[in-house]
Amino acid sequence: MSTDPELLKKLIDDDEIEDIELQKEESGPVIVIITGVAIPNPSSKKKRAARVVRGGWPCCCKCIGITTMIVALLCILPVFYAYYRLAGVIDQLTVETDSPRIFPTVQMSESELEDVIDRVNYFFEDIVDHESGSDIKDLILEEDEINGFIGHSDYLRGNFMVTFHEDRIVEEYSLPMDVLGFDGRYFVGKDYLALNSEVEQGDDKKNILEMKMEIEASHDDWFDGPLFFLQLQYLITKNKEDEGQNMLELLLENGSFFGQSISQEDIDEHHHNLLEGLYDAVGDEEEMIRKLISGIERVSIEEGKVVVKARSLSSN
């Protein structure tokens, strides 16, 4: 191969160079052959590689998009189904009304509420720590104090009320369901907790704690009776592992949930202390609760108030 500059000059004149430039503009990359040597456009391979890479992305994006859509559907469908089921339950347990019942509210200042909290805390601290040199003063909670706390809740204010009667606590409510997206529907009903001493059951006399919830909504096509009903026998006994500590025992006597009665067979099979787990558990919190239960001698429900009496320190 000759490298004579004069020969190259003769082979490639100005007209040929112009033709080559024109071809480059019209048809893209050009391969110039000079003295039998092919000189490729240096950027052509890079452009082809770039086109190959860019051509693969749309397929990958489609796969990601389809996968994301499937996952979203798998997450959303159960939510819609749960909402559908919830809507059915809401229809059964609530009532629709334009004039819901409004309960009277009790106005209490922040400082008054803090005084109540302090009084309760000091009472329980005295029981747990045994720091008082004399018998602990009874804790008295007024009905208005409880309703004062309710009045500080934006949701419960005017929609919930508590009253204290002899051996009975009654709660009444008309709770709006707009928080769940059901405008105009209300969960209306009342429940009570009653302490019945020395109730005759067969040949025995038992102390019975009774709870019952009834609602205004008609749900006859679903179940009959109250939402739930429970009767528990309560006993104060001595702890076998610590004779100085009292134990509270709760034993199921009778009950029903959503119209389904608890069978006598189940009651007999599970006739054990429902607070058994509390006394078996190990931990500071469980120990504190056990001390509180042991340190309370009696809880009495009177008209307009609840009175909690601590055990005499001399008897601990």
Image (cartoon, rainbow, N blue to C red):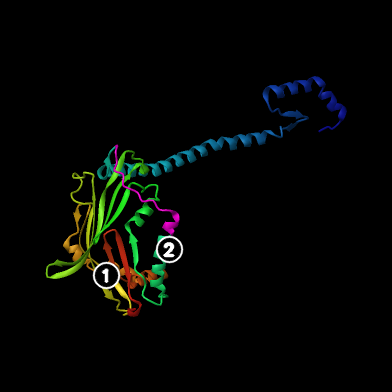
Check disc 1 and report its element: helix, strand or loop.
strand
Task: Identify residue for label 1.
Answer: 249
Judged by depth in the image, the label closer to the viewer, 2 or 1, is 2
Residue 111 at what x, y percent from top left?
45, 57
User: What secondary structure do most residues of the magenta stretch adopt?
Assistant: loop
Residue drawn where x is 43% and y is 42% of the image: 72
Task: Give the x, y percent position of residue 272.
Answer: 24, 69
- Image coordinates of residue 201 in percent, x first then y, are 14, 66
Residue 211, quarter of picture: bottom left
The label on residue 118 is 2
Q: Is residue 234 above or below residue 50?
A: below
- Give left or right: position of 257 versus 42: left
Q: CA distance from mark 2 to mark 1?
A: 29 Å
x and y percentages locating residue 282 in the rendered image: 39, 72
- Identified at 39% across, 43% down, the residue is 74
Q: Provide the residue span drawn in magenta.
A: 98-114
Q: Depth check: give the residue in front, 313 or 291.
A: 313
In the picture, the quarter occupied by the C terminus is bottom left
Residue visible at 26% across and 45% down?
A: 93
